[in-house]
Image (cartoon, helix red, strand yellow):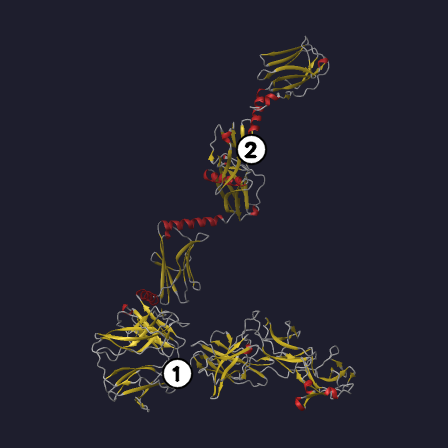
């Protein structure tokens, strides 16, 4: 709060209060007062800080105070749906090892109810919190035991519901575990010279050995789950420290049970848990010290564990009344059981939203509360619940709905009194209406006057002035007067305005105009606003021709003229202002004589668009009427929605109609035409300057007129125009779909200008729920050519759609119908659900496939090619629904027409595929792709002709699209480079390779969409090795061609009878002519009369044995050799005697030659 004046010598005292409790400097609050400012700071805000804060300035002259309510909402829960934190944690009845902790429950507006609480403790100076209770405690009070004597503790509480655990509360103030009676057992005696003597009762009772029993044992706290026992220590108790033992007995049991057998109690307080619900108990306590245990105390009266307080009942009737534009006063009847109440929680809800929000977050003790932060013009309902230690009551009944508006009061004061004209005997005055009407329309004004320097005011009018302009008569010429004005409404007369300045009653005779008046600022946006004013009462010596608008920022000297040329209108939009800056404005009227008097300066205006600013919007109602509309939640019962065109209020009832209801107003155009173009405005009185404008231009006008025409001349919107579809059996369905059809809608089907009715021939149906109208024609024939139309009517709305089926369009429908009919008949028997098609497998097999349906065991399936049946190893399993014919290595011989047939007693079906032409080419392309996908890398093979590059494939055919490239240049097949291949290999033969044949070679095979490349580098060592191998093979081949050979004529076995002559003849070859040598049993033998050799013409060699004897049996060999090598051929001779049985002779076979290698010199490659 800012404090004025700042009194430095007689400094006042600043006191802050929360809920009438004085606030002091603490861990949570810091106070400051100085330099004309009183401040209260919060180091860490909690719900505990919520409440009504009051600043009281106390001085010698009295007390001045100001109050404001601080709302502190819950922090977001760590777990969704968990409750808010408890608050106001306090400690009571602290003793050596015991304290009672209390707190207040959180509000649960949208969360599930709290089912209990966990209490945590922490030793002062440490940071580890320890949970005190294992199970949640259900009431807002818990006795904590087991404290260490002499130590200080702080406590916090967490709430639990079905969703989880809340954030912890603010920690309590520290509390010491000490016995307050100890202070009472010491006494201080003051003696002379400031000395003092401290006397302890322990010293006076030093002779006491065994203590006496405690006295006054009673229950200080009773609940359903525990009983707190209290007692007085024994007197005298002695010097030794005391402990206590508590015993309990269920009434009627006759036995006692020690409660604290394990833990000694040091405080005269103890909470007894684990009691049977509904059973009465009696208790007794024993004192003990190191010398012994006392006798038991007197037994208590029977005590039954039970809740001594119960949930409060719901508060009574809740009444909400208007307060301000953003707040409502809520009052309610207290609950019937209001004892031990912590206070109340108030919730609010926007009418119709069914969503409740908390108003306060800490219980309030009064049954009246002002709910702030509400939205002006919105309707709310309220409910209240009471809170005590047990929890929250049921919600009260909801209040009646209340609209957020300011309460009815007297109007505020008028302002801006201006002299508008003077004739020497009367003065015409104008003023501005009050900013706030007080919630009720202003009925009029009362004016008072007095002469300058006179004390007494005199009434000017006895009856109300209904305008903000008035002429005061019977004044004294040249006298000075001042005036004040007060407004009146239904409630009464408001405060009068400040007195005007002194006006001199002297006739105006200047030629320039008098001042414009009643300046009004509206449509304040971020960089612009609109200024309105009224024309001067005094025009001067000539008519007013225009106005100049001046403005300046507050606290600056220089005025800026917004318009260089005077505007003839009485409104002006000032643009290019700075957002967030404050401006003032004035207006000057202009006539032929010059610029007249300036108007009164306007009130300062902050150029900034208000949050939630609404604009005028246009529309067309259900009857087709064009309107402009505006919503203003800030409107009150006293507000007036003033519509204007060109900022002149509309009063033309022939062209416009205005309807205002609550905070909503509409301007209807009765007979809209081009004259309605222009700028429309609205201002709402008794608000904070709510206003807007709307430009009706040609484009917007045409849009609204078109929409109006559609509504006044409605058509049924269609999702789909009239269309047709051919059904499975060949029927033709004509259909149309509207967006929606009512049960009372009607329709007609018209074919070639003749309405058709529902019949067997034309089956007509209407599904109004989906807006579908259809007609099904079972037999669509050549006679059905023509135009089809559907006409629909639904109330006032109509529509129709036509479909022309003539010429080619009709022929297409007819053909499709006949095809579908045939298809339907075909499918009544066994049929192909998918006709023959081909595919290529990864193994480069071509599969001809088809799918079959509606088959049975007797159904017969066959394959045909070019009319002839195709034998297959295994008949297809028709039950699987698929049949395949494999073509392993496709070639031109496989071209032809393939057919598959199905037949049984229900009918037959045929599917054919012509595997030729483009189909063959497409398959070959697919084979190329599949083969290329799995192609091997290029390999080098050397032959006697040259070097061969090979790529191994799963399938190769010369018709496949392949290419070979050398150094990126395509190779054409020829003598030097020959391209070829086999079933599983493609090759390039490089004949007689040379240096120029070195380089990269690429083999590319083209598939359907992509190609596959394999590349090898035939250069460097790779070329050298291949070339050497080629030369070796070439030499070996030459040697093989020219070596000595036995071309034929010698059998491997010869059988002859002795005495006969044997002639072994063969043809030999060699280049040069070979040497021929004969051997017997691998030994050369000489020519004599018995053995004769001959070699005729260098190629016919023979061996003759005359008079064969058994000694001639054996192996005979011919050895043919030249420098390139040769071969040896063996003949076995078997001789049998005359008269012996001729040996069984196996069919003769030619003798197999044995090679003779060439000389090493011959096999050396050229150049070696």
Q: Which label sits on residue 358?
A: none
- Tell me if 219 is positioned left or right of 587 in this view: right
- 1 or 2: tag closer to the N-terminus: 1
| Location of residue 415 (image quadrant) | bottom left
Of the pair 644 and 336, the residue shown nearer to us: 644
Q: Please tell me whether residue 238 is drawn above or below residue 729 in the rendered image.
A: below
Identify the image quadrant of the C terminus: top right
- Name the residue tied to disc 2: 1022
| Location of residue 394 (image quadrant) | bottom right
Q: Position of residue 694 (x, y in %)?
A: 34, 70
Q: Please tell me whether residue 115 is drawn above or below residue 1017 in the rendered image.
A: below
- Name the residue tied to disc 1: 438
Q: Position of residue 887 (x, y in %)?
A: 54, 38
| Location of residue 948 (image quadrant) | top right
Residue plotted at (66% across, 89% down): 194
Q: In the displayed orientation, state which residue is furthest to the top.
A: 1089
Q: Please tell me whether residue 427 is drawn above or below residue 111 in the rendered image.
A: below
Q: Please tell me whether residue 124 is drawn above or below residue 1087 in the rendered image.
A: below
Of the pair 404 and 15, the residue shown nearer to us: 15
């Amino acid at each position: 709060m800012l404090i004025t004046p700042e009194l430095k010598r007689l400094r006042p005292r600043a006191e802050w209060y929360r809920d009438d409790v004085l606030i002091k400097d603490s861990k949570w609050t810091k106070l400051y007062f100085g330099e004309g400012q009183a401040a209260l700071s919060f180091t860490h805000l909690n719900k505990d800080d919520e409440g009504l804060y009051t600043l009281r300035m106390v001085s010698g002259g009295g007390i001045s105070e100001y109050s404001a309510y601080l709302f502190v909402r819950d922090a977001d829960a760590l777990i969704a749906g968990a409750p808010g934190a408890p608050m106001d944690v306090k400690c009571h009845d602290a003793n050596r090892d015991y304290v009672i902790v209390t707190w207040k429950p959180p509000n649960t507006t949208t969360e599930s109810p709290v089912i209990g609480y966990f209490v945590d403790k922490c030793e002062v100076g440490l940071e580890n919190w320890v949970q005190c209770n294992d199970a949640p405690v259900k009431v807002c009070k818990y006795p904590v035991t087991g404290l260490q004597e002499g130590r200080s503790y702080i406590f916090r509480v967490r709430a639990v519901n079905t969703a989880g655990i809340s954030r912890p509360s603010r920690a309590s103030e520290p509390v010491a575990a000490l016995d307050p009676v100890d202070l009472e057992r010491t006494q201080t005696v003051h003696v002379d010279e400031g000395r003092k003597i401290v006397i302890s009762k322990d010293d006076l009772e030093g002779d006491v050995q065994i203590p006496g029993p405690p006295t006054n044992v009673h229950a200080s706290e009773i609940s359903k789950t525990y009983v707190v026992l209290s007692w007085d220590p024994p007197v005298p108790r002695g010097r030794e420290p005391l402990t206590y033992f508590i015993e309990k007995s269920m009434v009627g049991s006759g036995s006692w049970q020690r409660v604290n057998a394990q833990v000694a109690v040091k405080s005269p307080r103890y909470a007894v848990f684990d009691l049977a619900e509904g059973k009465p108990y009696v208790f007794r306590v024993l004192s003990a010290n190191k010398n012994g245990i006392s006798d038991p105390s007197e037994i208590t009266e029977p005590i039954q564990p039970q809740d001594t307080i119960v949930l409060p009942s719901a508060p009574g009737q809740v009444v909400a009344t208007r307060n301000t534009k953003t707040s409502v006063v809520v009052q309610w009847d207290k609950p019937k059981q209001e004892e031990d109440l912590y206070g109340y929680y108030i919730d609010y809800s926007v009418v119709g939203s069914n969503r409740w929000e908390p108003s306060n977050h800490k219980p309030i003790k009064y049954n009246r509360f002002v709910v702030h932060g509400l939205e002006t013009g919105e309707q709310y309902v309220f409910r209240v619940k009471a809170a005590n230690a047990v929890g929250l009551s049921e919600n009260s009944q909801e209040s009646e709905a209340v609209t957020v508006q300011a309460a009815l009061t007297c109007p505020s004061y008028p302002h801006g009194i201006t002299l508008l004209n003077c004739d020497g005997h009367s003065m015409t005055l104008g003023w501005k209406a009050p900013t706030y009407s007080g919630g009720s329309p202003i009925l009029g004004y009362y004016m008072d006057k007095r002469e300058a320097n006179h004390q007494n005011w005199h009434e000017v009018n006895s009856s109300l002035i209904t305008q903000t302009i008035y002429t005061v008569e019977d004044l004294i010429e040249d006298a000075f007067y001042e005036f004040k004005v007060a407004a009146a409404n239904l409630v009464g007369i408001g405060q009068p305005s400040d007195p005007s300045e002194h006006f001199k009653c002297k006739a105006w005779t200047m030629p320039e105009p008098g001042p414009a008046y009643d300046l009004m600022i509206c449509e304040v946006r971020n960089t612009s606003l609109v200024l309105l004013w009224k024309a001067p009462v005094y025009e001067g010596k000539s008519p007013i021709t225009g106005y100049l608008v001046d403005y300046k920022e507050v606290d600056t000297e220089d005025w800026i003229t917004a318009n260089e040329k005077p505007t003839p209108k009485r409104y002006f939009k000032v643009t290019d202002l700075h957002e967030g800056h404050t401006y003032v404005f004035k207006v000057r009227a202009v006539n032929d004589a010059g610029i007249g008097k300036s108007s009164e300066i306007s009130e300062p205006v902050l150029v900034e668009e208000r949050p939630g600013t609404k604009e005028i919007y246009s529309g067309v109602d259900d009857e087709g009427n064009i309107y402009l509309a505006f919503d203003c939640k800030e409107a009150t019962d006293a507000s007036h929605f003033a519509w204007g065109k060109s900022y002149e209020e509309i009063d033309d009832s022939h062209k416009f109609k205005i309807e205002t209801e609550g905070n909503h107003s509409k301007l209807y155009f009765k007979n809209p035409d081009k004259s309605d173009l222009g700028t429309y405005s609205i201002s709402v009185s008794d608000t904070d300057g709510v206003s807007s404008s709307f430009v009706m231009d040609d484009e917007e006008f045409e849009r609204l007129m078109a929409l109006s025409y559609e509504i006044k001349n409605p058509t049924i919107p269609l999702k789909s125009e009239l269309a047709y579809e051919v059904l499975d059996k060949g029927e033709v369905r004509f259909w149309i779909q509207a967006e929606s059809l009512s049960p009372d809608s009607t329709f007609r089907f018209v074919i070639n200008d003749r309405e058709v009715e529902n019949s067997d021939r034309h089956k007509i149906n209407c599904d109004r729920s989906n807006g579908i109208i259809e007609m099904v024609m079972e037999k669509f024939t050549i006679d059905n050519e023509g135009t089809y139309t559907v006409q629909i009517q639904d109330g006032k709305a109509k529509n129709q759609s036509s479909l022309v089926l003539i010429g080619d369009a009709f022929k297409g429908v007819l053909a499709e119908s006949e095809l579908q009919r045939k298809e339907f008949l075909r499918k009544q028997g066994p049929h192909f659900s998918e006709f023959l098609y081909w595919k290529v497998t990864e193994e480069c097999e071509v599969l001809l496939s088809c799918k079959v349906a509606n088959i049975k065991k007797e159904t017969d399936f066959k394959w045909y090619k070019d009319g002839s049946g195709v034998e297959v190893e295994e008949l297809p399993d028709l039950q699987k629904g698929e049949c395949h014919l494999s073509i392993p290595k496709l070639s031109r011989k496989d071209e032809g027409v393939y057919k598959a047939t199905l037949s049984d007693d229900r009918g037959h079906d045929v599917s054919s595929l012509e595997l030729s032409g483009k189909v063959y080419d497409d398959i070959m392309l697919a084979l190329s792709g599949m083969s290329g996908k799995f192609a091997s890398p290029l390999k080098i093979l050397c032959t006697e002709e040259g070097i061969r590059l090979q790529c191994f494939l799963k399938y190769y055919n010369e018709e496949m699209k392949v290419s070979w490239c050398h150094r990126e240049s395509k190779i054409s097949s020829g003598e030097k480079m020959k391209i070829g291949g086999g079933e599983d290999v493609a090759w390039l033969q490089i004949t007689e390779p040379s240096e120029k044949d070195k380089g990269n070679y690429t083999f590319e095979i083209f598939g359907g969409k992509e190609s596959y490349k394999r590349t090898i580098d035939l250069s460097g060592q790779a070329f050298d090795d291949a070339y050497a191998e080629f030369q070796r093979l070439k030499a070996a081949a030459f040697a093989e061609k020219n070596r000595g050979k036995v071309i034929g004529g010698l059998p491997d076995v010869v059988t002859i009878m002795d005495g006969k002559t044997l002639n072994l003849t063969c043809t030999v070859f060699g280049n040069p002519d070979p040497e021929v040598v004969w051997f017997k049993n691998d030994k050369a033998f000489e020519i004599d009369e018995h053995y004769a050799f001959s070699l005729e013409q260098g190629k016919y060699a023979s061996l003759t044995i005359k008079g064969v004897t058994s000694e001639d049996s054996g192996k005979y060999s011919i050895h043919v050799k030249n420098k390139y090598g040769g071969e040896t051929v063996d003949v076995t001779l078997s001789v049998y005697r005359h008269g012996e049985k001729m040996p069984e002779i196996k069919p003769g076979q030619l003798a197999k030659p044995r090679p003779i290698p060439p000389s090493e010199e011959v096999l050396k490659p050229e150049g070696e």
